[in-house]
Image (cartoon, rainbow, N blue to C red):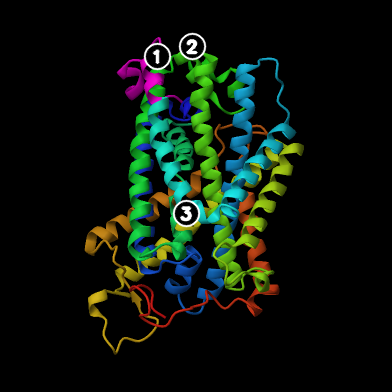
Amino acid sequence: MGAEWRHLSGGSAGLVYGYLFVWLGTIAVFTTLAELASMAPTTGGQYHWISQLAPPNIRTFMSYIMGWIVICGWMAILAGSGYLCGTQIEAVIQLNNPDYIPQRWHGTLLFWATVLVAVIINTILGRLLPAIEIVMLIVHILGYFGVLIPLVAMAPQKASSHDVFTVFENGGEFPSQGLSFLVGLMGTVFAMFGCDSAVHMAEEVQNASVNVPWAMLVTTLFNGAIGFGMVLAVLFVTIDITSVLESPVAALGFPYIQIFYDSVGSAGGATVMTVILLIMTVCGTISALATSSRLIWAFARDRGLPFWRHVQMGSAIPVYAVVVASITACVIGLINIGSTVAFNIVISLSVASLYASYIITESFLLYRRCTGGIRSRNSLDDTTEPGVLVWGPFHLPGIFGIAVNVFAVCFGIIVFVFSFFPVSYRPGADGMNYSVVMTAAVVVFSILYYVIWARKEFKGPIVEVTAYARPPGMVG
């Protein structure tokens, strides 16, 4: 909801204009990814595309490193999403029972319960997943208005437009307001995360070269629009940010629950509103498990993981990959029992890892499009050699496509750099941002593992179709 980020980095005005900037940047990032998804709709996503876009002498190495970066990023999202579900439940309990004292192991057990629900839906009910996702969309839309309307209509006081749109803060005590603003972007970046999950389900989608790109773009536009409405609503009804951040539920990381309570004046009403968001967070966990399991399955199929021989080639549901992803997430959840700081260090991989994959992939795409390295579909004929890069049905032509691609790369670099910043200028050990350590650890591990073992097995993504056997894309 942005209450804490509003206070620490940018204030109300910083959150408003930062949201719009991040929304615009996210549109550019996922529009460019949508072009790639249209060219090659494949579960591997970034690691597959880089194997086609990078120079021949480094493409296999780059593809392997990219595979680990993307998988680790999505595993961090899965663990973070499950953790949010568990701690949200704790916050709801505390709201209704002030004597409740949350323990770290409580959150971990609830985290595991959430992952179990996601496993059941992704395996036993896996064939119903498309129908379940339609229900999720309906709940998403109805729930949005179920939260927004009482939040605004029942709030006893509202801030002025002047306070919302012109007041900047620097709660993190950074040397300049501009630096504070840039650090404050990360909360919004995380909120708009994950629209590329459709890419990693592409091999299960009909007419994927058209449907996957449009799904990514429409999702980004729709969620960005309704998210902006919610941000404005929260800012207008939040009068005393200090008291909100000092509340018990804010100590658990959910100041918006206190905002709900202050607005509707009822623990029951705030609970219902929070449960709506909890349901959506559970849905996000289900989606994160589906995405991460498909990535694990695809990378194992391409012999990028040690257990590639056990991959289920003929199964409609990658049960082994779902089990691997869920067990890994639950093991990560154990870290929280010992130290929440250490747990947060692990899940901090999400933004840095995925944006690193976006930057690298989109930079190679920019080079290819500027040097004429990608052919139009209309230029193909019987003499076209295999391995030629071909634009898909979704494509931004000419200078407009280049401009969007350039902005996507520049925005990605901004996000990547500031994802390593702490939320305050002089943080203690608990407030440090260790994501740079985790990101570097993943890269170093993947390089060493490639040199020692993987280069003997991994030869790049396996091509299972012949040239022109499917909708035009990356042919080869």
Number of dots carrying numbers: 3
Q: Earlier in the sequence, mark 1 or mark 3?
A: 1
Question: 401 or 334: which is nearer to us?
Answer: 334
Name the residue type under label 3: Ser
Name the residue type under label 2: Gly
Residues under numbered marks 1 and 3 in contact, where contact means CB atoms less than 8 Å apart = no
Residue 142: x and y in percent read: 39, 33
Name the residue type under label 1: Met
Residue 196: x and y in percent read: 44, 54
* Outermost residue, bottom side: 383
Crowding at dot 1, Cα within 10 Å, few <14 / some 14-19 / many 20+, comes out as some
At x 52%, y 35%, the residue is 279
Q: Earlier in the sequence, mark 2 or mark 1?
A: 1
Callout 2: SS: loop
The magenta span reads: 148-174
Q: Earlier in the sequence, mark 2 or mark 3?
A: 3
Disc 1/disc 3 C-alpha distance (Å): 36 Å
Crowding at dot 2, Cα within 10 Å, few <14 / some 14-19 / many 20+, comes out as some
Callout 3: SS: helix
Please determine whether, in this image, residue 460 is positioned above or below residue 10: below
The residue beneath circle 1 is 154
Q: Is residue 197 left or right of residue 27?
A: right
Residues under numbered marks 2 and 1 in contact, where contact means CB atoms less than 8 Å apart = yes
The residue beneath circle 3 is 197
Crowding at dot 3, Cα within 10 Å, few <14 / some 14-19 / many 20+, comes out as many
The residue beneath circle 2 is 265
Quarter of image, res 189: top left
At x 65%, y 62%, the residue is 320
